[in-house]
Image: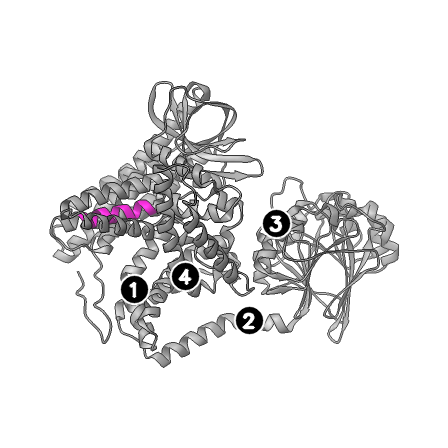
């Protein structure tokens, strides 16, 4: 084991225990075997192959554990821990996969109504109803079979129900995979549910329900925040979108029940026990019981369970007269949780909790000394070091999933940390009083005051457009993602402070290198029109210099990522051609991530705008026939529809004739929304000759015809569609008609983002991926890969 050595003003380097090798080995083995099991389960082949592999690997690990006598003491200790971890991961995975297979067979072999459903956790609300985790107990009892219960009503944790419903196999997608890793094997769509007669909830579920009933979190973000931070229930907080500001400011961990919550609860309990004169053993026993009860009360989140195991290990060490060691406790917690539920290795909450705690234990002292070396007061350096270490450690996990990096997280944690701590204390007191003295007035007043103040601070910090930066996960390579871990490893191994001037210069250089391309494009972007690759949806970016226009906003968050990879920071306007979800569905994400000056729709369509658009931060304006939108040197003229519309039909889409003339060349492109040949023939003669046609309705069979193409004579056609879409877009008929007209065709399915630049000899084309030969129409598309 390495020996800690002081270096200058640094504290001793934290010791890395051999047990961490066991934890890492167990995670690696469990992760591989559970993934193998899921692939077999999803394909219908079953989990037998994965179980056999787990048993074989476990036997190898056991043999390796026995045959380590020839190594030196340090290597032997390290390898034995690794072998123990591999052994635990192998047999835990085998047991988990066998139980999932047996549970699935039992569920499919019996009617759902013959068993009992017991709900667990909190519901998730959707536009189609709600869903909640549940365990199905067959008519003969036994172990529960994990399912997702989908209902039209909100259910609470611990309810015992009789259910009539339809069992559906887990889909072979990311949602199905995540459900399988969590222990679920199917989804049950309930058509009728009723409480089981004579059933009673567990004590902690009953107390939690009483607290939530007294708090009434539905409809009030402040009460919803208290429910989240005290009870671990975030259903109402998510429904009110109040959690968006915490996500944007990098403070979501302050709401989630984790180690900081348990540390505060344990401090309060320990204070009370010392006041009454309890001895060390009694304090440890009471504290373990209280902590366990609180974890059950808040829903047994993975991060809370990790903290509970660590605290229990520390208490046991103290009772035994030994010094607690945080990293050893973390290794033990990882091994215990992975053995109990091997799929936890894929739980994001568990990953974030384990990585951040490891980084804090290993590098907090280094980061604090580093900041103090830059003449920062310790009162500021300590909390800032804690935040920076945790944020940098979790970036490689959060960026690929959320596509966002908070720039205000350090200051937000400094301001909100104390507020949320006070809120937790006030909330715990309010919860205890509401249970002991139901109906007592003003019991929640202090907590509500702190909650509203916390929401105000979070909203204020999240408001600036630079509060968080959107990142397209697909463009962030593994080397850049893993850079924080490389820096952390170098700092831990070297354990010496760099000179302050060198540190500041290096930090500024890194920031400049990352920000310079975006800053350049924000001011000096060349004139271009980009058909963004956003799946089965439309989103087209028109820009020059600092002026930007987005025509349609896709269907989901993919448009936000697409704008990020184009280094967009601001939009002068967003035009929504019509109200199909694949043209406006991503607009809320765009409005959250970027500043948008205005949203433009066809004349008459504003009245039918979705609520998210009407209540959004950007003003909603209507434009009519012959209206002109100017974007740098571009002019976008409305050529359709000819009158007022509701925007509900494809044929009512706004159509823009976009032209550019400048020193670098000229370009004329027709953006057709979802209009097809019938509508195009009504405006094509007025438009005349164009360079590029954005094919309407994703290239449907009716999107073009000979008359339309003869009137427009496009030199290139581009369509936006999603790979494997259910509509067969772009259609064979559209491709053939374009080929017969001598018009090359590009689709985002093959090419990715398609960018067109003005040129003296027609549009110059750049694609994200090299364009292949279109075998169906027999021509080759010439494009330059970006």
> Could you say whether the residue bearing mark 3 is in a helix, strand or loop?
loop
User: Quarter-wise, where is residue 571 in the image?
Assistant: bottom right
Give the magenta-colored segment's residue range.
Answer: 304-315
**Is 221 positioned to the left or the right of 646 in the image?**
left
Horizontally, residue 566 falls left or right of residue 83, namely right
Label 1 vs 4, first from the N-terminus? 1
Residue 363 is labelled as 1
Quadrant for the N terminus, please: bottom left
Q: Could you tell me which secondary element the residue under label 1 belongs to? A: helix
Q: Left of 375 or right of it: where is 685?
A: right
Distance between the alpha carbons at the discs numbered 1 and 4: 18 Å
Q: Position of residue 762 (x, y in %)?
A: 76, 66
Check whether the beta carbons of the residues at disc 1 and disc 4 lie within 8 A of each other: no
Q: Nearer the viewer, mark 1 or mark 4?
A: 4
Q: Are marks 3 and 1 in contact (CB under 8 Å)?
A: no
Using the image, tell me which numbered label, if any, was put on residue 517.
2
Q: Secondary structure at mark 2?
A: helix
Q: Which residue is mark 4?
A: 413
Q: Residue at x 27, y 74 (%)?
A: 496
Dot 1, crowdedness within 10 Å: few (<14), some or many (≥20)? Answer: many
- Compared with 753, 701 (above or below) is above
Magenta run includes residue 612: no
Front tag of 4 and 3:
4
10 Å neighbourhood of mark 4: few (<14), some, or many (≥20)? many
Callout 2: few (<14), some (14-19), or many (20+) C-alpha neighbours within 10 Å? few
Q: Earlier in the sequence, mark 4 or mark 3?
A: 4
Using the image, determine if residue 201 lies above or below residue 410: above
In the picture of the structure, the residue carrying the numbered disc 3 is 535
């Amino acid at each position: 084991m390495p020996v800690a050595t002081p270096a200058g003003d640094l504290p001793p380097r934290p010791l890395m225990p051999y047990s961490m090798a066991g934890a890492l080995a167990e995670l690696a083995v469990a992760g591989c075997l559970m993934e193998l099991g899921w692939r077999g389960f999803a394909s219908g082949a079953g989990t037998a192959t994965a179980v056999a592999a787990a048993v074989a690997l476990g036997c190898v690990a056991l043999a390796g554990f026995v045959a380590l006598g020839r190594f030196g003491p340090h290597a032997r200790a390290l390898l034995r821990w690794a072998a123990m971890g591999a052994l635990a991961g192998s047999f835990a995975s085998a047991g988990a996969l066998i139980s999932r297979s047996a549970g699935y067979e039992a569920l499919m072999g019996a009617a759902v109504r013959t068993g009992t459903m017991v709900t667990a956790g909190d519901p998730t609300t959707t536009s189609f109803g709600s869903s909640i985790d549940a365990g199905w107990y067959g008519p003969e009892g036994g172990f529960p079979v994990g399912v997702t219960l989908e209902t039209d009503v909100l259910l609470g944790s611990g309810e015992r129900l009789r259910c009539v419903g339809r069992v559906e196999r887990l889909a072979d997608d990311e949602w199905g995979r995540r459900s399988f890793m969590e222990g679920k094997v199917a989804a049950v769509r309930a058509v009728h549910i009723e409480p089981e007669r004579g059933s009673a909830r567990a004590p902690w579920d009953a107390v939690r329900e009483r607290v939530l009933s007294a708090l009434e979190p539905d409809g009030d973000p402040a009460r919803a925040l208290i429910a989240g931070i005290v009870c671990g229930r975030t259903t109402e907080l998510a429904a009110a979108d109040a959690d968006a500001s915490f996500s944007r400011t990098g403070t979501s961990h302050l709401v989630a029940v984790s180690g900081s919550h348990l540390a505060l609860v344990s401090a309060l309990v320990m204070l009370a026990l010392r006041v009454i004169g309890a001895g060390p053993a009694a304090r440890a026993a009471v504290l373990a019981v209280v902590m366990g009860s609180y974890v059950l009360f808040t829903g047994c989140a993975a991060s809370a369970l990790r903290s509970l195991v660590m605290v229990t290990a520390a208490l046991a060490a103290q009772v035994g007269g030994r010094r607690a060691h945080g990293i050893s406790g973390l290794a033990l917690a990882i091994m215990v949780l992975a053995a109990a539920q091997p799929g936890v290795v894929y739980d994001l909450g568990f990953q974030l909790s384990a990585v951040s705690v490891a980084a804090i234990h290993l590098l907090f002292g280094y980061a604090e000394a580093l900041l103090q070396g830059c003449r920062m007061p310790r009162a500021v350096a300590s909390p800032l070091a804690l935040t920076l270490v945790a944020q940098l450690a979790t970036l490689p996990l959060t960026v690929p999933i959320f596509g966002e990096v908070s720039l205000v997280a350090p200051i937000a944690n400094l301001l909100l940390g104390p507020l949320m701590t006070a809120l937790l204390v006030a909330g715990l007191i309010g919860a205890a009083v509401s249970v002991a003295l139901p109906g007592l007035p003003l019991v929640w007043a202090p907590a509500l005051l702190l909650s509203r103040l916390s929401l105000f601070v979070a909203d204020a910090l999240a408001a600036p457009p630079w509060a968080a930066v959107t990142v397209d996960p697909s463009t962030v390579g593994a080397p850049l993602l893993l850079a924080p871990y490389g820096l952390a490893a170098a700092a831990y191994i070297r354990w010496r402070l760099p000179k302050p001037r060198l540190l500041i210069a290096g930090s500024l250089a890194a920031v400049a290198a990352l920000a310079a391309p975006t800053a350049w494009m924000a001011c000096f972007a060349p004139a271009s029109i980009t058909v963004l690759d956003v799946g089965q949806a439309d989103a087209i970016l028109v820009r020059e210099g600092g002026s930007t226009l987005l025509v349609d906003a896709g269907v989901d968050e993919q448009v936000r990522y697409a704008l990020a990879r184009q280094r967009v920071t601001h939009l002068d306007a967003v035009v929504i051609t019509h109200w199909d979800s694949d043209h406006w569905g991503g607009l809320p994400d765009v409005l959250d991530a970027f500043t948008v000056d205005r949203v433009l729709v066809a004349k008459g369509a504003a009245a039918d705008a979705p609520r998210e658009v009407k209540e959004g931060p950007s003003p909603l304006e209507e434009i009519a026939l012959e209206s002109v939108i100017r974007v740098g040197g571009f002019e976008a003229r409305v050529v359709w529809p000819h009158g007022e519309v509701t925007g509900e039909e494809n044929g009512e889409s706004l159509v823009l004739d976009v032209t550019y003339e400048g020193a670098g060349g000229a370009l004329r492109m027709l953006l057709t929304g979802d209009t097809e040949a019938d509508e195009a023939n009504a405006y094509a003669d007025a438009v005349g000759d164009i360079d590029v046609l954005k094919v309407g309705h994703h290239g449907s069979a009716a999107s073009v015809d000979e008359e339309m193409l003869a009137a427009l004579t496009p030199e290139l056609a581009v369509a936006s569609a999603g790979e494997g879409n259910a509509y067969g877009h772009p259609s064979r008929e559209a491709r053939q008609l374009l080929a017969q007209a001598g018009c090359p065709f590009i689709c985002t399915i093959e090419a990715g983002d398609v960018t067109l630049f003005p040129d003296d000899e027609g549009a110059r084309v750049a694609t994200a991926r090299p364009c292949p030969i279109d075998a169906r129409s027999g021509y080759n598309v010439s494009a330059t890969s970006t």
